[in-house]
Image (cartoon, coloured by chain):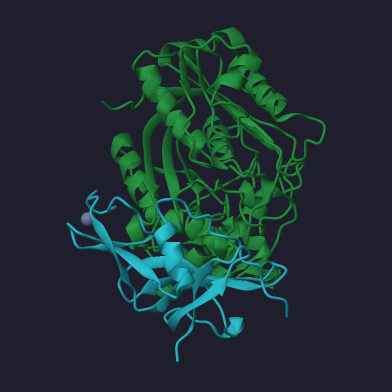
Amino acid sequence: MSTKGMAYIVGAYEHPTRKATDKSIAQLHAEVAKGALADAGLTKDDVDGYFCASDAPGHGPLNMIDYMNLNVRHVDATNTGGSSHMIHVAHAAQAIASGKCSVALITLAGRPRSQGQEKGAIPRADNPLQPDFQWENPYGITTLNIYAMVAMRHMYEFGTTSEQLAWVKVACSHHAQHNPNAMLRDVVTVEDVVNSPMVSDPLHRMDCCVISDGGGALIVTNREIARSLKRPMVKLIGAGEAPKGQTAGAVDLSYSGAAWSGPRAFAEAGVTQADIKYASIYDSFTITVLMQLEDLGFCAKGDGGKFVSDGNLISGVGKLPINTDGGGLCNNHPMNRGGMTKVIEAVRQLRGEAHSAVQVPNCDIALAHGTGGGLGTRHASATLILERE
Amino acid sequence: MAERIIPDPNPNPETEVFWEATKGGRFMLRYCGDCGKTHWYPRAICPHCFSDSSEWRRASGRGKIYTYSVMRRAAVPYAIAYVTLEEGPRMITNLVDCVLDELAVGQDVELVFKQSEGGYAVPMFKPAG
Ligand SMILES: [Zn+2]
């Protein structure tokens, strides 16, 4: 059974904070829940399904449900890192289509910046019980060098250059200048990016996203309730999810799970890449964007470098505007998880509520795509295709 | 320059055999008794066919750099890599005993062991020759 057209995003809220020294993590979750419900025109008592990932402190969803004093009949704590909350949208649609809930609340929040994680170059605090831990931890694996190795291989196989990668950051910075909440609002050039310090070859500091506190929330509901509200109708028409790992040693870093999640979402939606007016593309690093655009079929494999160049991702300039909020590269990356804000900006675009300087005219179909985990080790790709009704 | 401190691997009952072997200078791969394939990282149940019959065999220790990255921001810069083993699998490792700026994808490398904090012999690679 397809869930095409059976669920609508009626509430979307991004926390304005970027450094929340004076708030608890649970408080941030509740604040974004409140914000998304207000955006939808619904109340706490309307919520009958709750979705969160491991950024919600506690035993799956239990502690946040109790903290917010929710009364729900459906829960889902699927955790795939930064793509979790995009997968939650798809799973909420499935629950709504099968009658398991009618108003789903999805929350993300965290405060890595306030907790002292100002840099991404430190080894990850992985669980020693993870089966892969002992085969990676001795080697100084970090989120940064996992992605850097993918970029290095892409350059080797396809001739991609640092200048081409830099264009992704340039595009995000052009958008971020219009976002008063963005952490980095200065417009940068390709030269600025390639002249920023090399952090993990071939990635420069400006190839990396920001580390920020904050969060976001979404409300997903059925058609009947969506029609009763006063907000524009944003319908989920296609979804795909795909984990990709090291395949028992047959590692191939030339593609990501987007090569599987993308076709699944496009097939369900019945639309093609040419129909997508705006795309939110997970930008943990510049290479992440380039890889995903290829795998989603916006250009041929290996042509990502050419595709992102010369402002092609800048709203009003190029063919495929992406991350018009400034993305993870310039705006925010709450709790090191960027899938939530990708969906939120896609909803803004479809509603016509993006900043006027970056709003895509007649934006009727948008795509949001995320990669959670490590692009070069194991990750989960998630693709959502949304349509304004 | 100071040496990088290598964290311990934290072996468990499934993998103690491997880490005992490295202390004796042997780098072992696991081969499936049913489908005949090898894999990385070593597991008790074959990740190709789920067979529980497998044996350890010594690997040649030869490989090629599939990709790598030099972590410039660390207290002691180091190179992480995927190395394609002669036997087929690609493993995450470090490239050591080399000039970091002269590494290249496709380069031939050979096995070398480096001691972790707690005295484990961790398999790494250096330029061949
Ligand atoms: Zn087998």
User: Viewed as shown, does residue A267 lie left or right of A173?
Assistant: left
Front one among A317 and B99: B99
Image quadrant occupied by the C terminus of chain A: top left
Front one among A268 and A63: A63
In the rendered image, residue A162, in percent from the top left (x then y), is placed at: 57, 71
Determine the residue located farthest toward the left in the rendered image: B34
Residue depicted at 69% across the width and 67% down the height: B74
For ligand 1, which image quadrant applies? bottom left
In the rendered image, residue A212, in percent from the top left (x then y), is placed at: 70, 44
User: Which quarter of the picture shows residue B114?
Assistant: bottom right
Residue A66 to residue B123: above or below:
above
Residue depicted at 45% across the width and 34% down the height: A87
Front one among A174 and A285: A285
User: Viewed as shown, does residue B7 lie left or right of A388?
Assistant: right
Q: Is residue A43 visible?
A: no
Residue A134 to residue A203: above or below:
above
Q: Is residue A244 visible?
A: yes
User: Which quarter of the picture shows residue A111?
Assistant: top right
In the rendered image, residue A47, in percent from the top left (x then y), is placed at: 54, 13
Q: Chain B appears what colour?
A: cyan
Residue depicted at 66% across the width and 73% down the height: B77
Q: Chain A appears what colour?
A: green
In the rendered image, residue A315, in percent from the top left (x then y), is placed at: 57, 50
Image quadrant occupied by the N terminus of chain A: top left
Determine the residue located farthest toward the bottom in the rendered image: B129
